[in-house]
Amino acid sequence: MSLPPPVSSPHLPSRPCRRKTIYKTVCLSFLLVITVTVLQRGMAPSQFLQGQQQKELPTPEPLKTQKRDNSFSITSNFWKSKKEKAPSKEEEGGMTERQVKSWDITTTNCSANQNLSRVDWFKGLEPNFQQFLLYRHCRYFPMLINHPEKCSGDVYLLIVVKSIITQHDRREAIRRTWGKEKEVEGKKIRTLFLLGTASKEEERANYQKLLDYENHIYGDILQWDFLDSFFNLTLKEVHFLKWLNIYCDNIRFIFKGDDDVFVSPDNILEFLEDKKEGEDVFVGDVLYKARPIRKKENKYYIPSALYNKSIYPPYAGGGGFVMDGPLAKRLHKASETLELYPIDDVFLGMCLEVLKVSPVGHEGFKTFGIVRNKNSKMNKEPCFFRSMLVVHKLLPPDLIQMWDLVHSNLTCSRKLNVL
């Protein structure tokens, strides 16, 4: 039986019209999906397809930056500073940047800068400098131990000591001598030790347990998750400056030094008595027109590919120096405009140069001994130590003995006037 032919109705659209309606619905649905996706991702519509293409690019497998020992990264003209200019005091006063309230680094993964491995000059560098440059962009690491309460209230002098996890005997000697926390005529003195992690992986877990117990007793450790090594001393510098910028608003002065020096806090306080607010204090054993060392066997050797200038800016020997708190905060901002450099005290001199602040030399800071002849009796004479602010180098038994002698009923023929 045949069916009757279809009857056209004036109320039903023709087939071409229905197709057009379907196409419009599909297009509108597609546009709606794109709009919702764009709004969720917070990107401009022109970025949508670009973002999809970027997702498809393979990413190199990240490397653990803890394995970076003596390392950093670079661009083609890496010895030059970045384009940013450090803010002046006036600019800082009007800045409205978001103030970070706590340590905000939580990950430890960082990929090597593999572009360098294809550059000819890079291939000619020693392995430790190659590793340094490959990871130089790995700038900040998570905190393992933190004590922000050290900056609570008004602290007149914050003593900050660079140490490594294995040298607990040096920290103990300092706590018993010049690092003892106290209050002098209403001026609070607080002490902190800066550490990374043990450089030998097989020793790391045991030493960390010992450090945790030491910190439980004394509560004066700041530790970050990077390896303690010579090249990583600059990491310790920038981590402390960032930490200070976050947690310390009322630090008047900072002494920063090594864990093998003799320090007289009383002489430092006497020296600082006439310093005025707003004065850029940065005082130590300053080296002027020092030249980069090009002899490979030297601990401080620097290849010309890493630093191509003939002299360094003025800098204070890292054994010990004094700076004021507000300047330290500006140094943090200046440090972020520079590529990291493997010698920490030279790097700090570069930061001072950015700020146009000149470090001041002082006779009371002896970071190469009272006299450079290590065998001289003057280097063991307590009457000389009594007049100094900082003397390098004394290991724990000698430090304790010299401290006791200087603070005994010492009779000296004359007193040196170095303050």
Image (cartoon, helix red, strand yellow):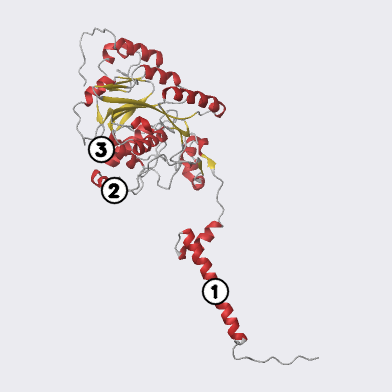
Residue 276: x and y in percent read 19, 32
In the image, which disc is placed on residue 95? 2
Circle 2 residues within 10 Å: few <14, some 14–19, many ≥20:
few
Q: Nearer the viewer, residue 377 or 403?
A: 403
Determine the CA span between mark 2 and mark 3.
Answer: 21 Å
Choose top left, top right, bottom left or bottom right for residue 394.
top left
Q: For residue 311, say whether it is visible.
A: no
Circle 1 residues within 10 Å: few <14, some 14–19, many ≥20:
few
Q: Amino acid at mark 2?
A: Met
Circle 3 residues within 10 Å: few <14, some 14–19, many ≥20:
some
Asked whether the beta carbons under mark 2 and mark 1 sit within 8 Å of each other, the answer is: no
Q: Quadrant of the N terminus?
A: bottom right
SS class of the residue under badge 1?
Answer: helix
Q: Is residue 211 left or right of residue 286?
A: right
Determine the CA span between mark 2 and mark 1.
Answer: 48 Å
For marks 2 and 1 on the same chain, the one whose residue lies earlier in the sequence: 1
Q: Residue at x 42, y 36 (%)?
A: 303
Q: Is residue 263 left or right of residue 11?
A: left
Residue 185: x and y in percent read 23, 22
Q: Residue at x 33, y 42 (%)?
A: 333
Q: Is residue 120 left or right of residue 275?
A: right
For marks 2 and 3 on the same chain, the one whose residue lies earlier in the sequence: 2
